Amino acid sequence: MDPTLPGSGLAPPEEEASSLRIRRPADGGEVGRVPVSSPEEVEAAAVEARRVQREWGSLSPADRARRLTALRREVSRRMDEVAHQVVEETGKPEAEALAEVNVVLALLRYYERRAPRVLASRRASSGLLFWKRSRIYREPFGVVGVISPWNYPFVLSADPVFTALFAGNTVVLKPSEETPFTGRLVEDLCRGAGLPPGVVQVVQGGGRVGELLVGSGLDRLHFTGGSETGGRVMAVAAGTLVPVTLELGGKDAALVLEDADLDRAARGVTWGAFANSGQTCLATERIYVVDSVYDSFLSRFLREVRSLRAGSGGRIDIGPSTTPAQLARTEALIRDAVEQGARVRAGGERVDPASNVLRPTVLTQVPPGARIAREEAFGPVVTVHRVRDEEEGIRRVRETSHRLFSSVWTEDRERGEDVAAVLGGGGASVNDVLAHYAIPSLPMGGAGRSGFGRIRGEEGLLSFTRSRVVVVD
């Protein structure tokens, strides 16, 4: 397990402090302290969730959707408060924190309209047994556990929690030990919306609390975080056969073809690589550029990158790394690459030695043996590679074991769709990055070391239910 990656909420048993002390990444000031949940409190939360679920799950999908309209209004009413808390704990620019809230609001609106239809029972063909009537029902699992990370502490907590509620489940959430106050807000918003007490509960702590939650008698678990930690989650969940959805790390690639609008591509991949200081599972970490336009693209890209404002406050484009450990890991990957012959074309150093803000960094000539060529960086660093043609570019995009998302840049729409269709993973964008997560109808998830299962969209909603059939003669 790499504890520096997002969602390191599961760890070998260890004695933890009695409280979490949270400091602002921007200036090191104390945000506050949160008591760590005891084993008895974790168990009690699961028991209470099961008691409440009987009533909540008995409501019709339409009734639940009507109740959850109040939740959307409560999130909207308090969006500035939520965004402020996200900024306090992560250091990201306020605009990015507000974007988290707006993405959640869009998902709530989508499920208000769609959940009643998607979750309704439906007739099914009985085939050769034509005299029988068959019907398929969707029912909630029961009690869902959610372990969420620190990089997008609101959206990556609220998305699975609120989706599980629409499906008729109750939820016990363990937010990252780095962002406990934002996690606590998820429960508080549900309470403010008038939802039944206990329908969402939060337990706080590090790896030990995460392990206790997985073993507390859950009916389903959703985990977002690093690939190594995801493996540990599966190992613990296997002991009680708890079904698991894993939304894990990525090492997303952009493929710039010779007919691309190079200015647009440079702007797009700059956003894709450095939004949230690169601390995004969907961040563009690798850029493959066809040889004939490589030099022209690189000059444009470097100009965009060098124009970014990095800092800890005020009008900034790039904020600090959320944790010192994550910053140290990113710097170690850069040093390793440089020692093996990579060239730093932009950034590579902190804004000042005492800060935890790393300037957006671009590496070229990265050898295949460098760690950054195969490991998720999860920081403000991207590698740029020259490829001979489209065919080599597709092969290079597909060669990683992390298969989450990718992008292709071309002025030929039909060609772009054809290339996107063969890039693999959870999906691809043509002439865009990151925006697909803001489309609530689209499922989100990956393959390989990027995990399995889906969140968001109809498929994500159904993943929090199981089918039950009734056949009548």
Image: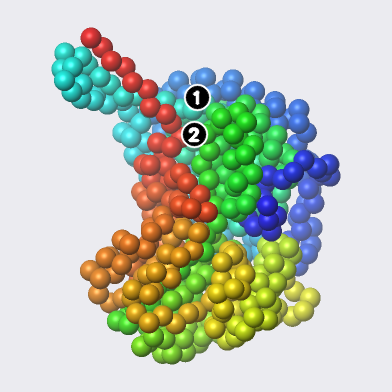
In the displayed structure, 421 sits above or below 453; it is: below
Q: Name the N-terminal-most of marks 1 and 2.
A: 1
- What residue occupies the far front of the structure in this picture? 369
Coordinates of residue 393 in the picture (x, y in percent): 39, 74
Q: Tag 2: residue type?
A: Leu
Coordinates of residue 451 in the picture (x, y in percent): 51, 49
Task: Report whether 304 appears left or right of 429.
Answer: right
Say which quadrant the C terminus sits in. Answer: top left
Q: Report crowding for label 2: few under 14, some 14 to 19, many 20 or more residues within 10 A (C-alpha).
A: many
Task: Report whether 237 appears left or right of 288.
Answer: right
Asked whether the residues under the numbered discs 1 and 2 touch, taking CB atoms below 8 Å apart as contact, a structural biologist would say: yes
Instruction: Classify residue 96 by image quadrant.
Output: bottom right
Q: Report crowding for label 1: few under 14, some 14 to 19, many 20 or more residues within 10 A (C-alpha).
A: many
Element carrying mark 2: helix
Element carrying mark 1: helix
What residue is shown with label 1? 56
Residue at left 74%, top 40%? 208
Separation of marks 1 and 2 at Cα, in angstroms: 8 Å
In the displayed structure, 288 sits above or below 181; it is: below
Coordinates of residue 201 in the picture (x, y in percent): 63, 34
Residue at left 23%, top 69%? 414
Residue at left 56%, top 31%? 242
- Let me know if residue 117 appears in the view: yes
What residue is shown with label 2? 165
Instruction: Classify residue 117 by image quadrant.
Output: top left
Coordinates of residue 35 in the picture (x, y in percent): 78, 41
Residue at left 39%, top 69%? 395
Q: Residue 363, labelled with which disc?
A: none
In the displayed structure, 51 sits above or below 210; it is: above
Q: Tag 1: residue type?
A: Trp
**Which is nearer the eye, 366 or 310?**
366
